[in-house]
Amino acid sequence: MKKITLVLTALALIGTSCTKELHNGGPAQEQHTLAAKLVGGSPQEAVPGTILVRLNAEAAAEIAAGNFNQISGTILNGLQATSFAPALPVKPKNEAAAKKYGLDQWFIVGFDTQIKPEAAGEELAKSPMVRSVQFNKMVKPVWSSEAHQFEGGLMTRSIPEAAAFNDTYASHQWNLVNDGTIAKNAVAGADIGVKDAWRLTGGDPSVVVAVFDCAVYARHEDLEDAVWRNEAEINGQSDVDDDGNGFIDDKYGFNFVNCFEFNEDYINGALNGQKQNAIKGRALNSNAGSGHGTHVAGIIGATNNNGKGVSSIAGGTGNGDGVRLMTCQIFEGSSYGTDAQNAAAFIYAADNGACIAQCSYGNANIITNDDLYINGGEIDVDGTSVKVNPSPLEHAALQYFLDPSNSNHESLEGNMAIFAAGNHSNPYSIYPGALPYVISVTAFGYDFLPGGYTNYGPGCKIAAPGGEFGGVAGDYTSMILSTGVPGAATQSPGVETEKGTSKQYVYMQGTSMACPHVSGVVALGVSYAKKLGKKFTREEMTSMLLTSVNDIDQYLKSGTKKFYDAMLKTYVDLPLNQYYEKMGTGALDAWKFLMAIEGTPSYMAKVGETAKIDLSDYCNPYDEYKISIDEQSRTALGLESDPVIKNGCLEIRCTKIGSGKITLSSAVGKDKDMENGIGEMNYTREISVVSRPFATNNGGWL
C-alpha cells in the first residue's frame, strides 16, 4: 500500500464549511493574495475559463440588496471577465439554510480560456470582498468494470422460494437471495436479507431517491413505472419552466453536466445584475457511458412483480407501491460535472423532494481527514507532494441537502446520503463518503468475502453486495445483475438480449453496486416507518442501519482469497486479515433494519441447531406464555416443530435461512380468587429470529 504523510496540518471539522485564515503575528491582517485565499487544489485539474470565489458576508448581502454592478465591478477589477454569476444557477428554496452554509456567498467567474486559472485567481484574490478562491474542478465517478451482457440461458437454476416475485430473472440475483447454490464457493446467506422484509413492505412512492450518476433510462421496461415524474413539466410546454422551480423541462430530473454552457441568458442576466432566469441543460442522456446510472437505479427500485426483468430492493410489490427514482445527472460519457454543478444537483434534490441521495462517485485521492477534503492541501505519496483539490462548495450543498429543515419525507427528519467507498483497493474510504454524517459502503461477493477492488478502513461504514468477476470469460454470475441501457458507449457495452430497445439487463461489479443496496434498504426503512406512523431523525435512522448487520469479520481473521486483477489479467492472493474490522460495522441486513424500526429485537439462530434464547433479555422469563408464530415465519425459518420455553429460555430449531417473528402472549391483573372479580390485561412481546448458517456469540447485537 502507498505510504501517506500529511503535509497540511489538520483542522477540526465542526460541521460547517471552513476556510483558512492567515495571521502574521500580533493582530490579524488580511492578505489579498491567491496563496492566502486559495482553498487548496491544483490549477492543472481546473476547468478552463472558470473559477469559483466565495465573497464575504457583507458583499453577498450587498448583491442580494441589488448592488450587483458596484460590487461585481470592484471584484472583477483587473480581470477581463466574460461572466460573473451566482455559483448555483437557481436560488435555493430554503434561503435560511442556504445562508447558514454560506451558499449565497459563492459565485462563478468566467474568463477567456487562454488566461491561466491561477492568474485569474491572483486578480480576484486582490479584492478584500473575496473570502476564498477555488479552482472549479471535475469530480469523477466510481466506475465499475464494463457492463456484461445477461443471457437468460447462462444459468438455469430454479429456486421457487427465492423468487418472492414473478420477475423473470429474480432467481439470478444472489445479492437479494443467496442460498449458496449459485456457485461452489458461494455462501448461503451472503445477501441483504430482503426476502422476508418484503412481507412487511416493498417500498412507497412517497420515498424519492435521487440518483447522482449517469441518467436513469426512463423508458426501460423495468424502470418506466419507477422513475420520478415531474408531471407539470411532462404535461407542460417545451422550453418552459412549467412548475416554476427554476429548471426547464426537468421531466424526470436534470442534467447538470456543462449546464452553464447552455444558459447564456442566465449568465448575461446575472452579469448585468438582473434576476436569474430559469436554467435549461442538456437533455438527460442515459446512453452516454456504460448505463451506470440505470444499473444503479435498477438495484434500488426496478418494478417488482411485473412478470419481467429483475427484482429490486424497494421496487414495490406490483401495485404501484415502489419508491421513485430521480435523475441528478452529473456524468455524461467522458464529461463529468464540476464541483459547482454537483452542488447545484444537491440543491435540486433537496428542493424537489428527494429524501435519499444515491452517490457512486468521489475524490480518488487518498484523503485522511475531513478538512483536507473540504479545504484542500497536500499529501505526500511515495515522496512526491500531491495537491488535493478541495470541495467546500459541494460540501456546503451536501449539508444543505442533509439539513433537517429540508426534510422531504414525513417519516425522516433530515435527508440521507449514501456513497460508494471506492474501487481503488485503498485502506481509506474516498470522500465525500468518508464524512462522519454520510454513509460509505464497502463491497463483498457471493462468497461473503470483500471484493478485491473495494476500499476499506477509516471512513467506511457498512458492507453490501458489490459482486466480483471471477476471471472466466462468459461467466458473470458472480457480479450484480440489474437494468442496463441499449446502445451504451462501447467502452462499457450493453447488448440487447431481446428485440426491442427497452429489454436490457447487464452485469456489473463495484462499490458502485454495493452503494445502491444500502440506498434501497434505507428507502425500505423509510417506507416501513411511514406504514407504522413513526418518524426518526437521520441520526436515529443511521444508528439503526449500522447496528442491523450480519458479522462479516468471522471470515476475515486469517487466510487469503484469489482476486482476478483485470488490469494485470491474472489472479493475485489477497490476505483477508487486512480487511478485519475495516469493512464497516458489518453486512447489511434489511430484515433486521425493519425490525429495529419496528422496535422488535432480533436474535441470531444458527441453521440446523437448537437456539436457546434467554427471555430475560426481552421479558419476564417465568411468566406463563402462549407461543404463536404465523405460517409465513414458520415457513421462512423452516420450523419442523413448535418453539418451547424451558428454564426461562425460548428454544427454537430453524432448518432454513430466513427471518420471522415469534409472539409471546400472556395476561396480568386477574383476581384468581374470584370468578367475576378484576379482569385480566392481555399483553404480548414479539421477538425476531434471523436464521443463518453462521451466528455470533452475542446473538447478532453489536
Image (spheres, helix red, strand yellow):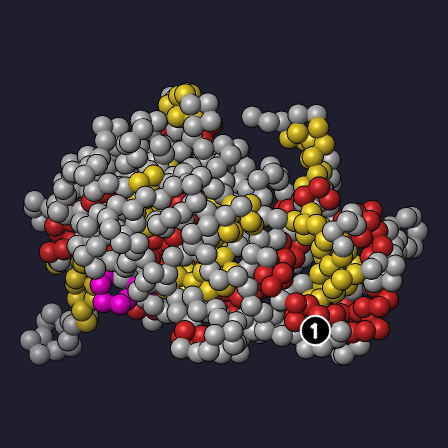
Mark 1, residues whose alpha carbon is within 10 Å: few (<14), some, or many (≥20)? some
Q: Is residue 442 visible?
A: no
Location of residue 81 (image quadrant): bottom right
Quickly name the residue at label 1. 269
Q: Quadrant of the N terminus?
A: top right
Q: Is residue 655 visible?
A: yes
Q: Which residues are magenta?
A: 317-323
Q: Which residue is located at x 32 percent, y 62 percent?
A: 224
Q: Which residue is located at x 9 percent, y 75 percent?
A: 674
Q: On the rendered structure, is 352 left or right of 642?
A: right
Q: On the rendered structure, is 243 left or right of 222?
A: right
Q: Nearer the viewer, residue 14 or 95?
A: 95
Residue farthest to the right? 26
Decide whether residue 319 is among the magenta residues. yes
Q: Nearer the viewer, residue 492 or 563?
A: 492
Measured as percent of width and height from the top left, residue 479 is found at 33, 38
Q: On the rendered structure, is 405 left or right of 134?
A: left
Measured as percent of width and height from the top left, residue 43 is found at 73, 44
Q: Nearer the viewer, residue 20 or 364?
A: 364
